Image (spheres, helix red, strand yellow):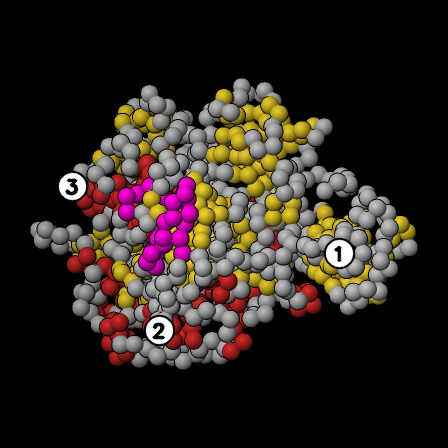
């Protein structure tokens, strides 16, 4: 941009494209709106956003997230591996969700929060971003293995869509043997999925039995026997000491602490999770030893105007890490951020899942103790597994553990027992019948007159026509919808049929009419009891949209409501590019629009030079990059979208081109920036092959130098490994490799600023002279002049002034050759500080007034 800005110590911040709200926004209304920021778009974050929008129709809502794939079912990733779900069924929200709810999704990484100032520092710009209320719903990441050799290719985790795609792509290779680490629910699902794909599996659990905090010894033995019968080698009471590489450098075997050698082509690590609370490291927020954020029943943290929900939260010491409780917490947090005083009280915790191919439910306390009696139903010789354990105290149900095959009706019994515990029912007269699947809990409670009408909620109620009981599905619901966001959670085990969702949405208040009504979705029930949704059908009357891709001189028409791009034989747009994934991207019709989604690839899908970070509405002329192939989208119906001037950043930066967080950019610090997987790294990359402190970029005399910090997996430039400590100057466009899969590009090219869409707007207005009454608002940068493309067009020189927000302060400079003035003094080509209320005189005689946000 020319001219030098005041010196400052930069932060390692990511940048990307501008959002939707930059243009056409009323300055005054924007400034008056309350600003809600949600960090994370999982179950808690999305539900909170919907609840806030319902209660505050005019508020500004921003969902900040560093996952390039928005809004998906983490709980169903293993179902995808099992083949129970198609790729299009992983998405938790419709492609137009953010537009329809007027929610800004900002693809960025939040680096730190300053609650006393109500500001956060994020990856869009070195300047802080203000907020009125903040929800930390950042979830958790997989706990990486720590044994020697854990960085080897083939050692995988499963937490994101990218992880799932990577596993699927790996399994398409010659994988015959695998080792799964961890005997929890995820490890067992890993095992099941690998067996279904014909892989020989060894399961290693360092504890002497499975899930010691959830299962008793009998249930653990039943599970182990079931696994061994299925051909799984079960190793209990041992842990991995090291990994050994094969001829290709990938993992070939694991060695346990007892010396047992386990040959393998793949390692699935399911060793627990780590709460993503690094952004609160210096915020003064109370956290648990494992990093979980301490909150009370209102989900408020120890810091003012900061809430936490989901996997990152510890509610009075309880950390569940489950989808439905996260949704419930998100709804309560969203309500309280809007001024409510609701409390998260879900009753006794009901944990229901699938352990391998057995249904499992656990609720309450199952340990023996003084004054407690234990009822056990463990039929033998039936050819089926069914084990039920019930703990009673004082004539009331205290807890239960149930495990068995489908015919054991584990979930049915578990839900009934939860009602008995929550209602504190005296079951002394029926204790012998409680484990009978035919026992009528509702009827029993009715006879005891224990069912009281729920207290009315403070907000207006909405009539919902209830379908017959036969249409209700008893399950742990994972469907996110604005209809369910307003419900007061009871058991959390009912998924409403799609027709109810539409009716409920259609009854929202008139002032939220911009919200798109949920469209009916076809569902199937997964074997673990979660409803999987099919792709949304276009509404009645929607026509097939004429559209096509042009690639390499060929025209590829898009037909049908769901089209795929990839190398798979069944792909609608089949490509032979080896850098393109089996399934790389999808085009789906939503109403009368076509949306493009990346399918969780390692290298991403790029639209008009920007990494895709949410569903993109396709327009004629869009250029799509997948692998090394570029496609041009053409449609006579979906014309090109004209966008005005955009906020840009021209600072040198590193862009993640592959691996976790693909598409994020990080503005380089003026002195140095460290890259690694550890919490102290400036640019954090959560990938097993990346060391805690892996590499460093140092700036000197306008040049950036890259060096490796002694990492095991290395740092590569131009296919050559850097010796530790040796510095290499980076050139614009240079691509380096960190570890085994992470590609990072160094660039100085201008890029659009994602955070600009949610930043407060400054204003410049013509108060006298030619163009009087005209004004323009801007987030980061504005040009004033007569040239086309300037934010404020006034008669005079083509470019009169430039205004800029930098490091939290505003600056201006002359572009007319010395013919502009600020507060009576001539402006020059160097940047000058600019304060609210100051007057600017143009060469044409027009007077401008600058207003800060």
Tell me the residue at 33%/34% (across/down). Answer: 267
| Residues tagged 3 and 2 counted as in contact (Cβ below 8 A) | no
Location of residue 398 by image quarter: bottom left
Using the numbered discs, state the Cα–Cα distance from disc 1 to disc 3 in whole angstroms: 79 Å
Using the image, determine if residue 402 lies above or below residue 654.
Answer: below
In the image, which disc is placed on residue 87? none
Q: Position of residue 413 (x, y in %)?
A: 24, 63
Considering only order in the chain, which callout, 2 or 3, is on the residue closer to the N terminus?
3
Q: Which residue position holds label 3?
A: 229
Using the numbered discs, state the Cα–Cα distance from disc 1 to disc 2 in whole angstroms: 55 Å
Q: How crowded is mark 3: few (under 14 residues within 10 Å), some or many (20 or more)?
A: few
Q: How crowded is mark 1: few (under 14 residues within 10 Å), some or many (20 or more)?
A: some
Q: Which residue position holds label 1?
A: 786
Q: Which residue position holds label 2?
A: 500
- Left or right: residue 615 versus residue 644 is left
Tell me the residue at 47%/76% (across/down). Answer: 508
Q: Nearer the viewer, residue 782 or 74?
A: 782
The magenta stretch spans residue 609? no
Q: Position of residue 435 (x, y in %)?
A: 20, 63
* Front: mark 1 or 3: 1
Tell me the residue at 60%/60% (across/down). Answer: 21
Mark 2 secondary-structure assignment:
helix
Q: How crowded is mark 2: few (under 14 residues within 10 Å), some or many (20 or more)?
A: some
Using the numbered discs, state the Cα–Cα distance from disc 3 to disc 2 in whole angstroms: 43 Å
The residues colored magenta run 547-570
Q: Which residue lies furthest to the front in this view?
A: 553
Location of residue 430 by image quarter: bottom left
* Front: mark 1 or 2: 1
Using the image, determine if residue 714 lies above or below residue 389.
Answer: above
Mark 3 secondary-structure assignment:
helix
């Amino acid at each position: 941009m020319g001219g030098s800005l005041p010196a400052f110590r930069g932060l390692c911040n990511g940048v990307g494209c501008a959002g939707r709200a930059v243009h056409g926004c009323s300055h005054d209304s924007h400034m008056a709106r309350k600003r809600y920021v949600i960090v994370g778009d999982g179950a808690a974050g999305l539900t909170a956003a919907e609840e806030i929008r319902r209660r505050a129709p005019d508020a500004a809502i921003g969902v900040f997230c560093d996952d390039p794939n928005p809004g998906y079912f983490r709980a169903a990733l293993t179902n995808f591996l099992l083949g129970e779900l198609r790729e299009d069924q992983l998405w938790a929200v419709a492609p137009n969700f953010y537009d329809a709810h007027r929610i800004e999704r900002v693809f960025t990484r939040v680096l730190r929060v300053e609650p006393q100032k109500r500001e956060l520092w994020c990856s869009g710009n070195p300047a802080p971003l203000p907020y009125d209320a903040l929800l930390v719903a950042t979830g958790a990441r997989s706990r990486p293995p720590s044994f020697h050799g854990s960085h080897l290719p083939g050692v995988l985790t499963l937490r994101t869509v990218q992880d799932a795609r990577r596993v699927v792509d790996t399994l398409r290779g010659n994988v015959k043997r695998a080792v799964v680490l961890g005997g929890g629910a995820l490890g067992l699902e890993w095992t099941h999925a690998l067996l279904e794909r014909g892989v020989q599996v060894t399961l290693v659990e360092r504890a002497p039995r499975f899930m010691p905090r959830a299962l008793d010894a009998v249930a653990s033995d039943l599970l182990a026997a079931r696994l061994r019968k299925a051909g799984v080698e079960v190793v209990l009471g041992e842990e991995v000491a090291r990994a050994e590489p094969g001829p290709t450098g990938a993992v070939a075997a694991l060695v346990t602490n007892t010396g047992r050698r386990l040959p393998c082509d793949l390692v699935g690590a399911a060793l627990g999770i780590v709460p993503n609370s690094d952004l609160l490291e210096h915020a003064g927020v109370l956290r648990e030893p494992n990093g979980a954020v301490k909150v009370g029943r209102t989900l408020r943290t120890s810091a003012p105007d900061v809430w936490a929900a989901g996997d990152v939260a510890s509610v009075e010491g309880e950390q569940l890490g489950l989808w439905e409780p996260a949704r419930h917490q998100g709804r309560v947090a969203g309500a309280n951020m809007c001024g409510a005083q609701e409390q998260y009280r879900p009753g006794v915790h009901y944990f229901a899942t699938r352990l391998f191919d057995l249904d499992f439910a656990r609720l309450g306390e199952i340990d023996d103790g003084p004054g407690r009696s234990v009822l056990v139903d463990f039929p033998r010789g039936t050819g089926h597994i069914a084990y039920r354990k019930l703990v009673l105290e004082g004539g009331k149900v205290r807890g239960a553990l149930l495990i068995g095959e489908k015919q054991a009706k584990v979930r049915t019994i578990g839900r009934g027992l939860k009602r008995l515990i929550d209602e504190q029912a005296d079951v002394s007269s029926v204790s012998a019948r409680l484990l009978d699947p035919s026992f009528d809990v509702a009827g029993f409670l009715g006879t005891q007159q224990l069912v009281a009408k729920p207290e009315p909620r403070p907000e207006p109620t909405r009539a919902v026509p209830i379908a017959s009981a036969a249409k209700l599905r008893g399950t742990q619901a994972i469907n996110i919808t604005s209809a369910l966001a307003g419900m007061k959670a009871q058991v959390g085990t009912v998924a409403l049929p799609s027709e109810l969702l539409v009716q409920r949405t259609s009854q929202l208040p008139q002032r939220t009419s911009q919200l798109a009504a949920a469209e009916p979705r076809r569902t199937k029930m997964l074997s673990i009891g979660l409803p999987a949704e099919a792709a949304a059908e276009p509404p009645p009357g929607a026509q097939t949209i004429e559209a096509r891709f042009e690639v390499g001189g060929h025209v590829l028409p898009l037909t049908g409501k769901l089209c795929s791009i990839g190398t798979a034989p069944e792909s609608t747009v089949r490509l032979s590019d080896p850098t393109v994934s089996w399934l790389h991207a999808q085009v789906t019709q939503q109403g009368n629009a076509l949306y493009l989604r990346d399918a969780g690839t390692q290298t991403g899908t790029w639209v008009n030079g920007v990494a895709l970070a949410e569903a993109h509405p396709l327009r004629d002329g869009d250029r799509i990059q997948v692998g090394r192939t570029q496609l041009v989208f053409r449609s006579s119906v979906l014309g090109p979208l004209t966008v005005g001037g955009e906020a840009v950043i021209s600072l040198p930066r590193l862009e993640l081109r592959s691996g976790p967080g693909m598409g994020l950019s990080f503005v380089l610090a003026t002195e140095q920036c460290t890259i690694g997987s550890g919490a102290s790294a400036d640019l954090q990359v959560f990938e097993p092959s990346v060391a805690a402190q892996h590499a460093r970029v140092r700036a000197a005399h306008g040049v950036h130098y890259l060096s490796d910090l002694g990492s095991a997996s290395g740092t590569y430039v131009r296919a050559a490994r850097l010796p530790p400590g040796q510095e290499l100057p980076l050139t614009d466009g240079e691509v380096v490799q960190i570890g085994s899969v992470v590609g990072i590009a160094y660039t100085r090219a201008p890029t659009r600023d994602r955070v600009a869409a949610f930043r407060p707007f400054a204003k410049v207005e013509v108060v006298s002279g030619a163009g009087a009454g005209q004004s323009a608002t801007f987030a980061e940068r504005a040009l004033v002049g007569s040239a086309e493309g300037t934010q404020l067009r006034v008669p005079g020189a083509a470019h009169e002034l430039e205004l800029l927000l930098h490091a939290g302060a505003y600056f201006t400079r002359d572009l007319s050759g010395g013919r502009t003035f600020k507060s009576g003094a001539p402006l020059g080509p160097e940047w000058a500080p600019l304060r609210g209320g100051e007057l600017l005189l143009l060469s044409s005689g027009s007077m401008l007034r600058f207003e800060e946000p």
